[in-house]
Amino acid sequence: MSTIGRLSVSTPQGPSGSVLLDRDDYLFRYADDAHRDCAISLLMPVRTAEYRSRELHPVFQMNLPEGYLLEQLRNRLAKITPLDPMLLLALSGSSAPIGRLAVQSEQVDALLKRQERMGPGERLEDILAWDGTENLFAELVDRYILRAGISGVQPKVLVPEAGSRDKATARTSDLIVKSGRDEFPGLAINEFLCMSMARQAGLPVPEFYLSRNLQMFVMRRFDRDDSGQPIGFEDMAALMGLPAAMKYSKSYELIAKAVRLFCFGESQARSLSELFDSVALSCIVGNGDAHLKNFGLLYSQPSARDARLAPAFDIVNTTAYLPDDALALELGGSKSLFASRLGILEFAVRCDIRHPQERIERLLLAVETVLRDQIALAEQVPQVTAAIRSSAERFAQTFTR
């Protein structure tokens, strides 16, 4: 049984309600005076009846730490308190979580006050230029581990950026700092190259950087506006009402269906176009990890009807490490990367793409351009470069005139 029985939830538009643990069920109950603009999810409009679930509601699971970050939290808190979903939710929602929801409890506020080791933040240029003998990423994790408002198996941490504080809002910009894993050598370079290909192809992407020692990939978060105000974000697992553990279920066609359901007008057309390019690029570069949590929608608040596809992120080649890897989701009824050459044409119809071959040729050109312009980096990771080229060549043989 959790030591936390109730958590308060709020949005930039005002207080929303409470998450409660009722025996084996999780409840979300809107406050009696909650305004409709304070809805916590596109799937959960303000209503009198409570929302009951056998596990945390998907929108609350979205930012729960996984993998490396979860293990580091266990190590940090092992002697203080056991980790459970309510505590993880309180930690992930208490300090600058991804999206617009803030989750708080008195117990966690007291814990953070005792454990907090954060300083004024970190300068981006210092992170990128680090060449010391100590492991900077490990130090950043140790310092900011309790700012756990980001999911993902890859080692990563949310770091406040020094000197970015907005005087009017008292908010700071945040950097997402990622490190590689021993079993995936060159992962930071890998992501930098693949994200550069997305940018070269004209896909919206967050600002991103590669550290000078080639060990860390750094990205600015994209769920804040120019004044630092949180923007709503929900990943596709949450939008489909699925627990995070089911992120490898379903299909890219269902993502397109979700875009049609939640996006309107020009935003829908633009989002479908960007979705096609993002999925096609993942097929071309051999990205077998483009799962439901790596796609999402941004919006101001649920009733505004202004949802649009979030920028592309977390694009990497996986076949360099797993030669027989497959797509994370079904495309045209198959997860085969090889068969994706046919599936992507069917997917183009779902996304209202009139000239898919021209789009794919543009993506292939972006891949070649980045590998040529970043040849020094590409030579640092020959296994990754070879895997990208091998995957792209199959598409080139099919689509290049």
Image (spheres, rainbow, N blue to C red):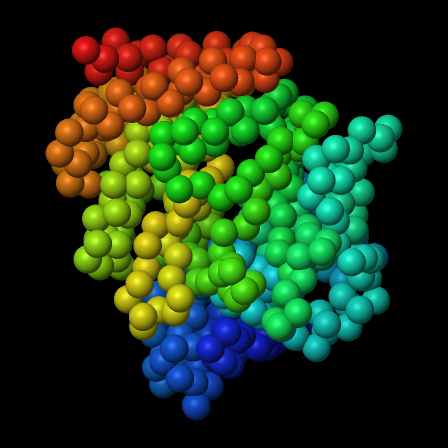
Compared across the picture, whether 249 is left or right of 157 comes to: left
What's the residue at 65%, 75% (across, down)?
105
Q: Position of residue 123 (x, y in %)?
A: 73, 47
Q: Which residue lies furthest to the right in this view?
A: 133
Compared across the picture, whether 128 is left or right of 387 comes to: right
Q: From this viewpoint, is residue 104 visible? A: yes
Q: Position of residue 385 (x, y in %)?
A: 50, 13
Q: Which of 51 and 2 is in front in this view?
A: 51
Compared across the picture, whether 192 is left or right of 113 comes to: left
Q: Which of 357 and 141 is in front in this view?
A: 357
What's the residue at 62%, 39% (across, down)?
218
Q: Which residue lies furthest to the bottom in this view?
A: 33
In the displayed structure, would residue 197 be above or below residue 353?
above
Quarter assignment of residue 165: bottom right
In the displayed structure, would residue 313 be above or below residue 94?
above
Label total for image? 0
Compared across the picture, whether 378 is left or right of 256 comes to: right
Q: Nearer the viewer, residue 387 or 61?
A: 387
What's the residue at 70%, 77% (across, down)?
106
Q: From this viewpoint, is residue 80 visible? A: no
Quarter assignment of residue 308: bottom left
In which quadrant of the rendered image does the C terminus lie? top left
Q: Position of residue 31 (x, y in %)?
A: 46, 86
Quarter assignment of residue 136: top right
